[in-house]
Amino acid sequence: MSSRKGQKDASRVVREQLARERRRRRTLWTSVAAVAVLVIAGLIGWSVYAAQRSDDFTAPTGANDAGTGVVAGSGPVTIDVYEDFICPACKQFEQLSGPTLDTLIDQGKVRVVYHPVAYLNRFSSTQYSTRSSAASGCAAEGGRYRQYAKALFERQPPEGGAGLSDDDLADIAAEVGIDRDGFASCLREGTFKPWTEHVTEEASRAGITGTPTVLVDGKPIENPTPDAITAAVEAAAR
């Protein structure tokens, strides 16, 4: 009798263990399914947000079709220049190679796309990279992007400070022949801040990790000196 009772008790213990295991598996798979639903929903939500965000900007006059930069020239070879207005190396590049780009544009040899990215906001206390890039969009709208960009580099503030004020940015616009009131309004309303975000995000997606970065027909120039740029343009034109 005690043997049969022991067998029954053992069977009951086994049944209870099996039932607990089934409940555990159901809970596990329910949790996995819930997480999967949340992940899928999150991905869908992010895709919708990203699509809306990438479309929610106004590119300035003179921008390329993708809205990722401002175009100068219409030559057969395309040069992409990625710059940040607070980047000291970008200022040096402009001083050294900017005149070469201007010459190549004037000679009808190149189409230069300037991408004013905002990578270095952490180096100012007022997000100067974003503000100056958006200001360059206002300048492009006034048809004076290159003149304004050169002036920004000439007046480049030191890293770590507040950068130029909005009044300073508007004064520079007036100095290069842009209507100050219209420019100040564009700046104050943040008209091209979404465009700056778009330019910066697309540059990052394209694998641009630093400034200045120069591409000639899609090929990076490691040391973009005047001679290197000229040689790359000549090679691309062959």
Image (cartoon, rainbow, N blue to C red):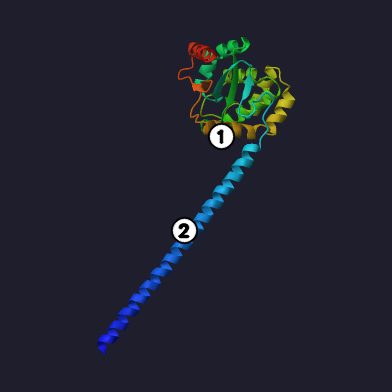
Point 55% across, 11% down: residue: 100
Question: Where's residue 212, x and y in %?
Answer: 51, 23
| Disc on the earlier residue, 1 or 2 | 2
Left or right: 38 as drawn, with respect to 195: left
Q: Residue 31: horizontal and vertical position, in percent?
A: 47, 61
Do the CB atoms of the residues marked 1 and 2 lie less than 8 Å apart?
no
The image quadrant of residue 14 is bottom left
Please tell me whether residue 65 is drawn above or below residue 18 in the rendered image: above
Q: Quadrant of the N terminus?
A: bottom left
Q: How many marks?
A: 2
Look at label 1 and name its amino acid.
Answer: Glu
Residue bearing the label numbered 2: 32
Tell me what residue is drawn at x 37 percent, y 75 percent.
16
Residue 142 x/y as whole percent: 71, 22
Instruction: Decide if residue 215 is on the left or right side of residue 24.
Output: right
The image quarter in which residue 155 lies: top right
Residue 88 in sight: no
Q: Is residue 191 above or below residue 155?
A: below
User: Residue under circle 1?
Assistant: 201
